[in-house]
Image (tube, rainbow, N blue to C red):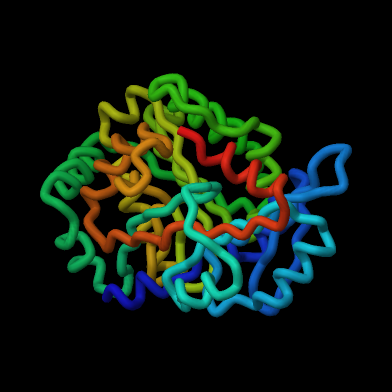
Amino acid sequence: MKNTTQNAMDARQTPEWGRYLQSIGWQRIMASRTQVMVRKFPFLDISLIKIQHAFGPFPFKQIDAIARHKKSLVVLIEPHIVGFDATELKSHGFFQSKMLLAFTATIKIDLAKSREKLFKSLSENARRNIKKAQKEKLRVKIYHMKDKKNWEHFDEFYDLLKNLTKMKKFYVPSRDEYHKKMTAFKNTSYLVFAYENEQPIAVVWYVHFGNVIAYFQTGITRRGYETFANYLLVWEGFLLGKRLKKTVFDFEAIYDERFPKNVPKHIGYSEFKKRFHGDVILYPQPWVKTYNILGAILHRLSTLS
């Protein structure tokens, strides 16, 4: 049901996401139920504030107070669908922007249906490739990162991720930053690997929160593609979500035609994700409030083509 998927919480408003950002230099401040993240500029008594995929209505008086206290140049709100009210944002001095720090589109899948109906809901291509992968007799292994002993597999995950970046030519943060991010989510993180002859050929990092299991990151080898391990691991993610009694699977990001210059390489993997069907979720365009001339200049520079 689309209401279920549209109303699902996003990872960026979880306490774990706040702890991750704190570990890389942001400050987390709660304004009512809204997670506000503040980043101080090095050596300067000024800051940037971002609020990502938060439910409305927003506590504007508290946000303004935080912005003034932290001498923020800009407050960027990337709204969730739930509680979004453009008129209210305008009335509090915000305007639409193309300043992006979070993804603006995703696919969410309803996991409440039976396993049989869920499989039948996939595209013919996805179903066929999952069956091909199963015939390859790959060994699927799931590691819950809450267990310290499973951290020995972190390097395998990151090496597969880096292999993918070399093949597809895109950038990801450092091993250290990924370690901090996974540490923040360790209690709710699972690494789902596909092995062939005891060699890891593909992995997906899944995180759960609320009623959601989210596809955080993947890594793969050429052999992983040849055996369709990437399809198998998405299906295994669906089954993991069902075992955890989650009702929504979130693919986290797809290409958004409204912002064609924002990571155009998303087009390729978006086609892969769309083969599992589900609901395409388009978040509202970002909204910005600038607090002085420096904020206006910063915003202008950040949105130049």
User: Hey, which quadrant is residue 260 in on the image?
Assistant: top left
Residue in the picture at 19% in, 66% down: 116
Quadrant position of the N terminus in the picture: bottom left
- Examine the rendering and report whether any part of residue 188 can be seen: no
Quadrant position of the C terminus in the picture: top left
In the depicted structure, whether residue 304 falls above or below residue 118: above
Q: Position of residue 272 (x, y in %)?
A: 27, 42
In the depicted structure, whether residue 234 falls above or below residue 61: above
User: Hey, which quadrant is residue 242 in on the image?
Assistant: bottom left
In the depicted structure, whether residue 226 falls above or below residue 272: above
Q: Decide which of 143, 197 is in the foreground and name it.
A: 143
Q: How many marks?
A: 0
- Examine the rendering and report whether any part of residue 120 can be seen: yes
Residue in the picture at 26% in, 73% down: 113
Q: Is residue 149 left or right of residue 42?
A: left
Residue in the picture at 35% in, 60% down: 282
User: Hey, which quadrant is residue 68 in on the image?
Assistant: bottom right
Q: Is residue 251 left or right of residue 147?
A: left
Q: Position of residue 59 (x, y in %)?
A: 65, 78
Q: Position of residue 127 (x, y in %)?
A: 17, 49
The residue lying furthest to the left in this view is: 124
